[in-house]
């Protein structure tokens, strides 16, 4: 993929997450893709990650990804962003994050997500 194709893919992927389009998000992943988070050091399958996305859609319906930086890599992209949402109690919430995405054949094969664990703690009261 060219640099522009990778950046366009990244835009489509983040847009699908933000809009809650689970089918579009799933289509961005290779069937055997792995997703890892620094807060638990566990690799998730795509199916497991889709359950988390479903939960996010329910609990944080107005989520927005404010992209601070996105750069194409030879085999994927890196993105720094702030996830912004309103919690069910009406409080505004933000979480800083960075993802390193590896791609093959136009789909994601691995996504490593680094999130601010202190900011993520606010979600624990929501059952996550």
Image (spheres, rainbow, N blue to C red):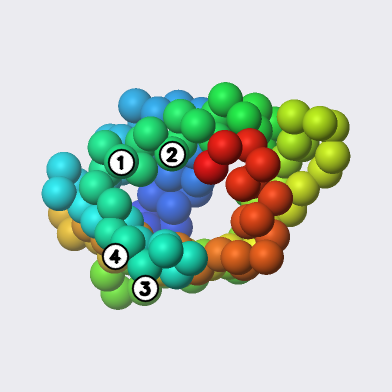
**Which residue: 30% across, 41% down?**
48
Contact between marks 2 and 1 (CB within 8 A): the answer is: yes
For the N terminus, which image quadrant? Answer: bottom left
Q: Which mark is residue 52?
A: 2
Q: Is residue 126 above or below residue 39?
A: above
Label 4 neighbour load within 10 Å: few <14, some 14-19, many 20+:
many
Residue furthest to the right in view is: 91
Q: Nearer the viewer, mark 3 or mark 4?
A: 4
Q: Which residue is mark 3?
A: 73
Tell me how far mark 2 sits from mark 3, CA to CA. Answer: 26 Å
Q: Earlier in the sequence, mark 4 or mark 2?
A: 2
98, 48: nearer the viewer: 48
Label 3 neighbour load within 10 Å: few <14, some 14-19, many 20+:
some
Q: Which mark is residue 48?
A: 1
Q: Secondary structure at mark 1?
A: helix
Residue 21, horizontal then vertical, whole percent: 45, 27
Q: Earlier in the sequence, mark 1 or mark 4?
A: 1
Tell me how far mark 2 sits from mark 1, CA to CA. Answer: 7 Å
Q: Which mark is residue 104?
A: none
**Which residue: 69% across, 60% down?**
119
Q: Nearer the viewer, mark 1 or mark 4?
A: 1
Contact between marks 3 and 4 (CB within 8 A): the answer is: no
Q: Which residue is mark 4?
A: 102
Label 2 neighbour load within 10 Å: few <14, some 14-19, many 20+:
few
């Amino acid at each position: 993929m060219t640099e522009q194709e990778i950046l366009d893919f990244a835009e489509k992927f983040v847009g699908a997450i933000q809009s809650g389009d689970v089918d579009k998000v799933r289509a961005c992943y290779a069937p055997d893709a792995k997703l890892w988070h620094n807060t638990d050091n566990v690799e998730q399958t795509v199916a497991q990650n889709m359950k988390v996305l479903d939960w996010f859609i329910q609990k944080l319906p107005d989520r927005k990804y404010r992209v601070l930086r996105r750069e194409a890599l030879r085999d994927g992209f890196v993105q720094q962003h702030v996830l912004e949402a309103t919690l069910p109690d009406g409080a505004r919430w933000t979480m800083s994050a960075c993802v390193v995405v590896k791609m093959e054949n136009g789909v994601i094969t691995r996504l490593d997500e680094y999130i601010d664990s202190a900011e993520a703690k606010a979600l624990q009261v929501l059952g996550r």
